[in-house]
Image: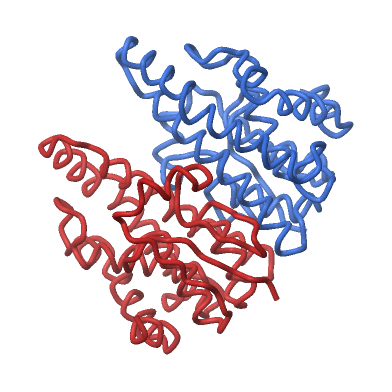
Chain colours: A blue, B red
Amino acid sequence: MYKLKLDYFDFHGGRGEVPRLILSIGGIPFEDNRIPVSEWPSVRDNAPLSALPVLHVDGEAITQSNAINRFTGRLAKLYPEDALQALRCDEIMDAVEDVITKVVVTFFIADEEEKKAAREKLADGAIKTYLVYLQTLLAKNSDDFFVENRLTIADLKVFTWTRSLRAGVLDYIPDTIVETVAPRLVEHCDRIAADPGVVAWYDAH
Amino acid sequence: MYKLKLDYFDFHGGRGEVPRLILSIGGIPFEDNRIPVSEWPSVRDNAPLSALPVLHVDGEAITQSNAINRFTGRLAKLYPEDALQALRCDEIMDAVEDVITKVVVTFFIADEEEKKAAREKLADGAIKTYLVYLQTLLAKNSDDFFVENRLTIADLKVFTWTRSLRAGVLDYIPDTIVETVAPRLVEHCDRIAADPGVVAWYDAH
């Protein structure tokens, strides 16, 4: 067993939510090191590549969300062993990361009109395109889960993203966008939210 | 055995170079479908997520560079089986992908002065930071290879990037940046370039 500590912000959602869910569902002990957003400037200077989440494995600090998801997913048996299923799982996770990266860029736009324009362009462009593509992949696999007809880290990655879109956390991105563009991802989001392991995590936090 | 076809541009380097090298080194047959840049506009409309590379596995089109690298890496036995080593390998690949994504954004800046400013900012910022971080990871592992003290897909991912930086393919990014900022990555780049499998690929193309 590895000694695990996960550094991430002290809120629900975002890139750190996925490994928290994975480890919790897998029953794997870890230190859930929640960093208040107000402390971020001082934390950033010590974080490798100035980014979170960071996973400490027996004291070794490791970056990159999907790398962390995959490692914790293997420990929790939520990652496929078969090479082709793992490829499909990885494609989905990297696609979500792609579009999240495009959205994160807009956090740093200071001018409100410019931010609005960038967000509206994303809503009509990349966010729509990626939602439609993910819905197609879901339908191709089983319509219930993305890979192997069971809960995997691909479901948790998509779930945390669609959940935040539906919560309307982003100004100028309509909270109905998932429903409008990829209704099957709404059903998927609700299905994952009802998973006993997911329910247990949110009940406890 | 899967029937594999790899769609990518008809040039050396870029995101498609890594799976070409991996499959070639592993002796795994694949159709190397090289798309002339001039045909890109029509190819783009049919490519999932309008991006390359695309790997076709028994006819199923799959996107996302590092997902493709990992799958082909497993087939070629150039990807670690141990979970922690795989995590380190994944971190490196995703870090390189991160910084490549930041650079690719500048390809679409039409105004030359603006492009120059963006590239110079990257050279002094993200590119430098990532090179230094990668050099630290290399030193931490073995100084010869990034993971497991042998050639893995992490080496090939870093190699194709540092090779292109050293070739000076990007205007306003000095071709000496790797040497200046992370000299051990120059040695690493030369080491990988001298790998018999890598030499064989470039000799044949």
Q: Position of residue A193 (x, y in %)?
A: 80, 26
Q: Residue at x 77, y 46 (%)?
A: A141
User: Which image quadrant for residue B14?
Assistant: bottom left
Q: Say above or below: A163 vs B14.
A: above
Q: Residue at x 40, y 62 (%)?
A: B136
In the drawing, does residue B41 fall left or right of residue B1? left
User: Which image quadrant for residue A12?
Assistant: top right
Q: Position of residue A3 (x, y in %)?
A: 71, 53
Q: Position of residue B171 (x, y in %)?
A: 15, 53
Q: Nearer the viewer, residue B80 or B172?
A: B172
Q: Residue at x 31, y 15 (%)?
A: A114
Image mark count: 0
Residue furthest to the right in view is A196
In the drawing, does residue A107 fall left or right of residue A30? left
User: Where does the C terminus of chain A fall, quadrant-wise?
Assistant: top right
User: Where does the N terminus of chain A fall, quadrant-wise?
Assistant: bottom right
Q: Nearer the viewer, residue B38 or B71?
A: B38
Q: Say above or below: A181 vs A131.
A: above
Q: Residue at x 81, y 53 (%)?
A: A77
Q: Say above or below: A202 vs B92.
A: above
